[in-house]
Image: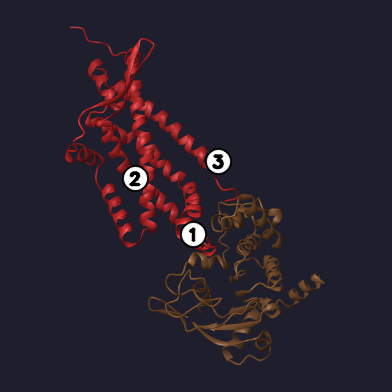
């Protein structure tokens, strides 16, 4: 994929494949084109050049019904983007009703199921502004889940959250990753990456610098650029290793 | 020669004696107001959507219209439509007559004056309402429409189900400006001969030779009406507020 804004080249030939049930983690310095990449994938921001295939179908071709394609590519946003005038439950059910044409009752039932998966069912009747950031993001995840998409894209889902709220969101993401959801996650949560990523991609200035398994990245990253970046992350955020251990213990 | 002594209380009662004309004028003013506000709202909504989402051509047409209306006097617009365009509609009246106590009251639903009055006021108000609506739409983050599209909604569905429900709630405090201005703007329609409140006031002055008191009474009627409208919109704003926001 290639993408520019005016004179600024944001993506300079980024390419990858994603198999079913894979969790791909994309990371890299800010301005490296990570968010743009995600918005290209669901065609909210179509690439200038390049092709995207979903189950063998070229969605970048002209004449493709993008609205239909987007029902199959969920998205979770950095700033949640919940519909401010709708209760949590309606945020989740509106897509089912208005896009998939479910009846009011059916949509409500499915929305409640999705809210239960993110442990937000008891907050169903609250408005976004009455919820914490972490709760809002879980509703955001439920909104994406409820459409039963083939893939869910996560655009820095925890970077706008207070530190003590990050855990609950990561926990939900771990749960759905382990349940076999296909995911592309832009994040700097290396603990999450370590736990579930099938492949990690390091993006810098619109190009893939290095890719590999979490093990590869944490044991012996090839480029100096990546090593430096990982070191910075560790200094800034810690590794969250303990938290992931804690979560896994809880599960057992 | 006897100089007539000014007796304010007496004058007030004299003017209130014309209550049938005042009532008829008030009804006409409200009639003009309600139609102009309503038609102006729907036109304004269209204009604001065109300007915000209409692409190059529609947004420019809409923007040009708004600038033109806001940049020229209402009275010029009214005269242009009434005298300038020379639309042959003839002279006719659709009216209702009823009597309260001993007085016969005539209320004109529609004649060519009221019709052109409503058209001019609507076209004018639409431009102002469009700008209120547009700034309300712009205040809603781009992320809302993006989120709507990300779950498969079309742009139009996103605007209808996500953007407008929020924009229409948010616009109320600013929009109440227009709702409070417009009753007073209807006064210009008296200049093409419609007998709304101000037109009736002029005819009362002509009959009674009492001017200041008449206009003060008319002013008080406007004041009370607009106070009620403002209060009503304030209540509407509070009732439709999004919890927690």
Q: Helix or strand or loop: what does disc 3 sit on?
A: helix
Left or right of B245 on screen, residue B225: left
Q: Are marks 2 and 1 on the same chain?
A: yes
Q: Position of residue A238 (x, y in %)?
A: 68, 78
Question: Mark 1 packing: few (<14 Cα in 10 Å), some, or many (20+)?
Answer: few
CA–CA distance in space, label 2 to label 3: 25 Å
Chain assigned brown: A
Kindly check if marks 2 and 1 are in contact, taking CB atoms under 8 A apart as contact. no
Residue linked to disc 1: B141
Badge 1: chain ID: B
Q: Is residue A203 above or below residue B222?
A: below
Kindly check if marks 3 and 1 are in contact, taking CB atoms under 8 A apart as contact. no
Left or right of B203 on screen, residue B30: right
Report the disc number at residue B126. Answer: 2
| x 48%, y 56%: residue | B157
Residue linked to disc 3: B239
State which mark lies toward you, 2 or 3: 2
Q: Quadrant of residue A162?
A: bottom right
């Amino acid at each position: 994929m290639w993408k520019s804004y005016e004179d600024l080249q944001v993506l300079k030939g980024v390419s990858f494949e994603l198999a079913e049930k894979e969790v791909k983690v994309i990371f890299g310095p800010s301005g490296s084109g990570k968010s743009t990449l995600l918005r290209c994938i669901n065609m909210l921001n179509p690439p200038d050049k390049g092709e995207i295939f979903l189950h063998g179908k070229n969605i970048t071709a002209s004449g493709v019904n993008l609205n239909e394609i987007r029902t199959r590519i969920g998205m979770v946003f950095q700033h949640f983007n919940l519909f401010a005038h709708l209760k949590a439950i309606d945020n989740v059910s509106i897509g089912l009703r208005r896009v998939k044409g479910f009846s009011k009752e059916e949509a409500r039932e499915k929305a409640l199921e999705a809210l239960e998966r993110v442990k937000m069912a008891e907050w169903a009747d609250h408005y976004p502004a009455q919820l914490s950031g972490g709760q809002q993001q879980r509703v955001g995840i439920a909104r994406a889940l409820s459409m039963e998409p083939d893939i869910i894209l996560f655009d820095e889902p925890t970077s706008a959250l207070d530190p003590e709220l990050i855990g609950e969101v990561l926990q939900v993401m771990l749960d759905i990753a382990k349940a076999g959801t296909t995911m592309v996650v832009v994040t700097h949560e290396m603990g999450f990456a370590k736990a579930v990523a099938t492949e990690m991609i390091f993006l810098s200035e619109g190009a893939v610098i290095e890719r590999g398994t979490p093990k590869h990245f944490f044991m012996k990253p090839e480029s100096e650029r990546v090593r430096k970046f990982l070191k910075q992350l560790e200094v800034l955020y810690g590794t969250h290793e303990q938290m992931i251990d804690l979560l896994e213990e809880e599960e057992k | 020669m006897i100089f007539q002594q000014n007796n304010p209380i007496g004058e007030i009662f004299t003017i209130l004696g014309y209550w049938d004309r005042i009532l008829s004028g008030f009804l006409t003013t409200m009639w003009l107001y309600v139609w102009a506000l309503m038609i102006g709202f729907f036109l304004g909504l269209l204009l604001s959507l065109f300007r915000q989402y209409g692409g190059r051509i529609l947004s420019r047409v809409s923007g040009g219209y708004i600038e033109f209306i806001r940049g020229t006097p209402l009275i010029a617009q009214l005269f242009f439509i009434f005298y300038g365009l020379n639309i042959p509609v003839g002279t006719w009246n659709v009216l209702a007559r009823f009597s309260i106590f001993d007085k016969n009251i005539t209320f004109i639903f529609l004649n060519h004056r009221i019709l052109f009055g409503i058209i001019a006021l609507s076209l004018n108000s639409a431009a102002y309402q469009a700008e209120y609506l547009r700034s309300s739409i712009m205040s809603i983050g781009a992320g809302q429409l993006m989120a709507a599209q990300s779950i498969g909604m079309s742009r139009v569905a996103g605007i209808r189900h996500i953007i407008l429900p929020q924009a229409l709630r948010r616009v109320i405090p600013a929009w109440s400006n227009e709702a409070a201005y417009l009753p007073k703007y209807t006064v210009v329609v008296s200049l093409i001969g419609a007998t709304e409140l101000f037109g009736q006031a002029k005819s009362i002055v002509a009959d009674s030779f009492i001017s200041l008191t008449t206009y003060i009474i008319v002013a008080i009627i406007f004041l009370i009406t607009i106070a009620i409208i403002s209060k009503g919109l304030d209540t509407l704003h509070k009732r439709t507020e999004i919890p927690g926001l």
